[in-house]
Amino acid sequence: MSRKEAAGKLWGGRFETATNRLVEDYTASVQADRRLAPQDIRGSMAHARMLGRQGVLRPEDVEAIVEGLRQVEAEVAAGTFVWRDELEDVHMNIEARLTELIGEAGKRLHTGRSRNDQVALDFRLHVDEALAQWQACLAELIDVLVHRAAEHVQTLLPGCTHLQPAQPVSLAQHLLAYAWMFRRDFDRVSDARKRVRISPLGAAALAGTTYPIDPGMVAREVGFPGVFTNSMDAVADRDFVMESVFCASVIMAHLSRLCEELILWANPAFGFVRLPDAFATGSSIMPQKKNPDVAELMRGKTGRVYGDLTALLTLVKGLPLTYNRDLQEDKEPFFDTDRTVSASLRLMAAMMAEMGFVPERMLAMLRRGFLNATELADYLVGKGLAFRDAHHAVGRAVAFAEAQERGLEDLSLEELRGFSLLITEDVFSVLDYHQAVARRAAPGGTGDVPVRGQIADLRAWLRELRASL
Ligand code: ARG
């Protein structure tokens, strides 16, 4: 317990004895936050340049710092950087190495800043890069869904409410419903990024600084459009993490619904999809099995992301202003979410690109479910019958056909007229499933005209997005 040991810390000046070993292990975050090294280095370069421009640092010191940071960056990238737990976190590891490399000038870098605004900047830069990745993955998934939808404008399946067959829809309409969900997720992430892309550097520990700094210049250097307006808010705020993980939670909820459908559709009772071999697994004991494990795991991992969101919300709720060490716990939930949501989106895009749809099975279930019953009732209403009476007549026709294991469209004109004399030869086009779908031509409906309109809209959006990158 020598003075020397305690003084080994960057903050060791006022300490008499060394840190307890357990405390060191408990408080060190470097194994997790070393991931922020690239952002930490970028932020420090911007900070040093700004201090130089403002006359706080001499030009030769700025040059030495930037040069030294480049070398640290290279060591980190090459995996030769030695991370030391006793230096607590990414910030102090990098600063210590910088000083080892360039001497005196390294000790001047931390002028006018604190780890509190430093970590907030690093993390904002990291989160923003992750969100941009999520957006690229979302666009890729939307692209795949639109592509598959375009192949299946004429493929029909039972649209459900209550998981009961309700009305025929096109597979395209079904897939596009998900494309629109992911499109909204994309927009939600764009909106969140507006609040992530704000530089907190210059808030210092909590109260701002006496040095003549220029926070706007730092923001420009790191490519953020916004600058903090209140130093206390700048170091205490973690909304940007909570909001990002909320966006991820909604993405996972959407993925999980799609997973649930794929799992059902892969069951032989539905048989609507054949899982591509590359995306399914077998059973170690039942040779006939082909399991939808990817979809199941993705549904399961949704809970993990909700857990991360809960952890963050709970982390912040009782904290007095401003920085509290609790906030160090904000990173791992985000890293976990980032890993989960990125991998899930990529996998879903790859799996949907190869999903084997089985239109015959979809059509078979349409027939068995009398999904043209509403059409027949509407037809009778069109011929002047009151809706209640039409409903009753069609109900009797369904019971009759069902008893013989036939569809309504399989009954003869004579048989149909047994339920209402208003029925004539033109009924058969009404009972045709494709026509039932095509007739839903009003905006947003499942008819091929509005469906092709949706495909065109999403394609135009994707094109514009690519052009803007
Ligand atoms: N490792 C810390 C974190 O992630 C950095 C900030 C430390 N600040 C402090 N005052 N101890 O939150």
Image (spheres, rainbow, N blue to C red):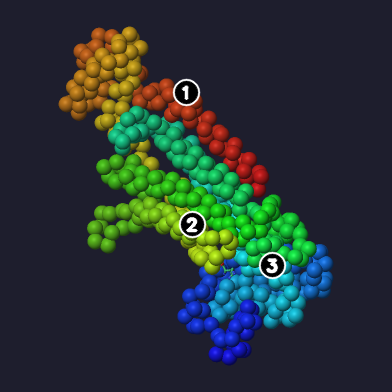
Task: Kindly report which numbered mark, 2 or 1, lies closer to the viewer in this rendering.
Answer: 2
**How far, Cα to Cα, is label 2 from label 1?**
48 Å
Quick one: label 3, few (<14), some, or many (20+) residues within 10 Å? many
- Using the rendered view, name the quadrant where residue 79 is placed: bottom right
Name the residue beneath numbered marker 2: 317
Name the residue beneath numbered marker 3: 113
Residue at x-position 61% and y-position 76%: 93
Residue 266's place in the image compared with 99, above or below, is above
Per the image, label 2 sits on a secondary structure element best described as: helix
Residue lying at the far left of the rendered structure? 403
Residue 93 seen in this snapshot: yes
Task: Kindly report which numbered mark, 2 or 3, lies closer to the viewer in this rendering.
Answer: 2
Name the residue beneath numbered marker 1: 442
Per the image, label 3 sits on a secondary structure element best described as: loop
In terms of depth relative to the viewer, which is nearer, 14 or 49?
14
- Using the rendered view, name the quadrant where residue 430 is placed: top left
Going from N to C along the chain, the mark reached first, 2 or 3, is: 3
Per the image, label 1 sits on a secondary structure element best described as: loop
